[in-house]
Image (tube, grey):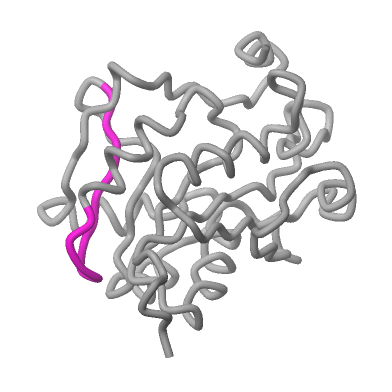
């Protein structure tokens, strides 16, 4: 039974990546402004109004638990993280099904330039469990993504490899509310050694 005081939109951080192009360093533990990236993602979601945050771990999960301050988060381990983001999204959505959330605001741990302002904008697109929304940057769809609970089964079924929710959102493009965020966020990914220059 859902808690009537529970905010309907839960935050979901996909933080399982192993950083193959970064020499195998878990992305969750890359340092930004003195703290691990995963902490920044959680803090931004909370500042955007998500009182409940689930974090999907994979690469270096034990080290992340030890080194990152994630008190109050639900930590979900994805044993299949090497199969790509799709498996982490499935694990994260599965962890939300029993808690009464009516939508998930999905963020990627390796996008530190996307903060609370963009997350709050996309979260504000929530209407009910059929809501679908995504940030866009100059008209190009990106993260964060808001997935209403009515879509979770479909998203999970379509998620494979590193595709995440992309295929599902493409198939349901007419139902997706695009929220322009280029004025408040920088949607770069931390994928390669060169990208590390975006970290402070």
The image quadrant where one finds the C terminus is top right
Q: Is residue 84 magenta?
A: no
Residue at 29% in and 43% down: 122
Query: Which quadrant would residue 104 be assigned to in this image?
Result: bottom left
Q: Is residue 174 left or right of residue 163?
A: left
Q: Which residues are magenta?
A: 126-137
- From the top left corner, tell me how far across and down residue 87 is, in percent: 59, 62
The image quadrant where one finds the N terminus is bottom left
Residue at 65% in and 47% down: 15
Relative to 69, say whether 165 is above or below.
below
- From the top left corner, tell me how far across and down residue 178 is, in percent: 19, 40
Residue at 27% in and 31% down: 136
Q: Is residue 57 left or right of residue 123?
A: right
Query: Which quadrant would residue 142 be assigned to in this image?
Result: top left
Query: Which quadrant would residue 72 be assigned to in this image?
Result: bottom right
Q: Is residue 133 magenta?
A: yes
């Amino acid at each position: 039974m859902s808690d009537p005081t529970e905010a309907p939109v839960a935050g979901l951080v996909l933080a399982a990546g192993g950083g193959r192009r970064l020499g195998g360093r878990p992305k969750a533990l890359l340092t930004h402004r003195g703290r691990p990236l995963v902490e920044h993602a959680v803090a931004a979601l909370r500042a955007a109004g998500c009182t409940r945050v689930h974090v999907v771990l994979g690469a270096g999960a034990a080290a992340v638990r030890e080194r990152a301050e994630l008190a109050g988060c639900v930590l979900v381990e994805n044993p299949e993280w090497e199969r790509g983001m799709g498996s982490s999204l499935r694990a994260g959505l599965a962890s939300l099904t029993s808690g009464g959330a009516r939508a998930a605001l999905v963020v990627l741990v390796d996008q530190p330039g996307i903060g609370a302002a963009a997350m709050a904008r996309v979260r504000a697109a929530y209407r009910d469990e059929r809501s679908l929304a995504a940030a866009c940057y100059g008209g190009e769809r990106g993260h964060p993504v808001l997935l209403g609970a009515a879509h979770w089964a479909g998203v999970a079924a379509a998620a494979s490899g590193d595709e995440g929710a992309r295929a599902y959102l493409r198939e349901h493009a007419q139902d997706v509310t695009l929220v322009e965020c280029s004025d408040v966020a920088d949607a770069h990914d931390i994928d390669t050694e060169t990208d590390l220059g975006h970290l402070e």
